[in-house]
Image (tube, rainbow, N blue to C red):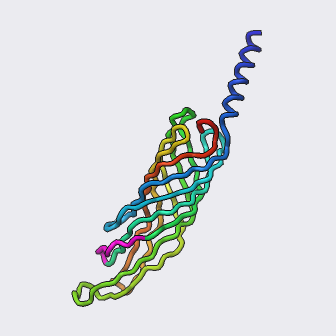
Amino acid sequence: MKNVFILVVSLMAFRATAQDFKPVKVNLSAGYARPAGAGSAGGVVLSLEPKYGLNDQVDLGMRFEGAFMGRALAYNGKTTQTQINLAGSYILTGNYLLTTSNFRPFIGLGAGLYTTVGGSLTTDSSTGATQVNDASVKGGQKFGGMARIGLKTGHFTLGAEYNFIPATQISLTSVQVIKSNNSYWGIKFGFDIGGGAYR
């Protein structure tokens, strides 16, 4: 009889935990973005990330993000004036939550398409500093990756991400190269809608 009682209590506890976990959630986040490379300036990043929980510790998702920040072009080792642009991304993500308590550190990876920003380079020919006028680097799409660490408590999240995106460059001559560093950091605060009481 005692064993039957223990079994019933265990099943009830398992059922309560299972009911608390709901697989579908959506994360909304905002924060600070900073491009890689000298001469860059930080800005604002906004993201939307629907996620599906395979279990209580593994989430798969799709992150839609826009980062409004200042980026500088590099010309033969020298940086140009910072230009404000919007960079977007559409990437698949995977998160692993390290605990099942209400205080949940997590790590994650992602990969997908990034929309890179273009920029123009205009030099003052009267200074004789360079030999190029009104050159530009065009924007486009590149395949890249993302790594993140963070903390979730209740439905609130705080995380840091680094987005690895190949640089864009054009060669004007054998020695004249204009380069745009596309990678950037993001530090974001957000919250999950759905996913159960504390998930």
Residue 174 drawn at (x, y percent): 36, 85
Q: Count numbered badges in the picture.
A: 0
Q: Residue at x 38, y 63 (%)?
A: 36
82 part of magenta stretch? yes
Check the picture and name the quadrant holding the C terminus: top right
Where is residue 78 drawn, in percent x and y?
Answer: 29, 74
Instruction: Name the outermost residue toward the top.
Output: 1
Is 55 on the left-hand or right-hand side of 157? Answer: right
Query: In screen coordinates, is 139 left or right of 181?
Result: right
Magenta region = 76-84
Which residue is found at the position 27% from the left and 86% from the top? 124
Tell me if residue 75 is in the magenta stretch: no
In the foreground, 161 or 197: 197
Question: Residue 37 falls in which quadrant of the image?
Answer: bottom left
| 57 w.r.t. 84: above or below | above
Quadrant (top left, top right, bottom left, bottom right) of the N terminus: top right
22 versus 72 height, above or below: above
Query: Going 32% across and 74% down the picture, which residue do you hit?
Result: 81
The answer to which of 64 and 185 lies nearer the viewer is 64
Residue sitting nearer the eye, 197 or 6: 197
User: Residue drawn 52% across and 42% down?
Assistant: 156
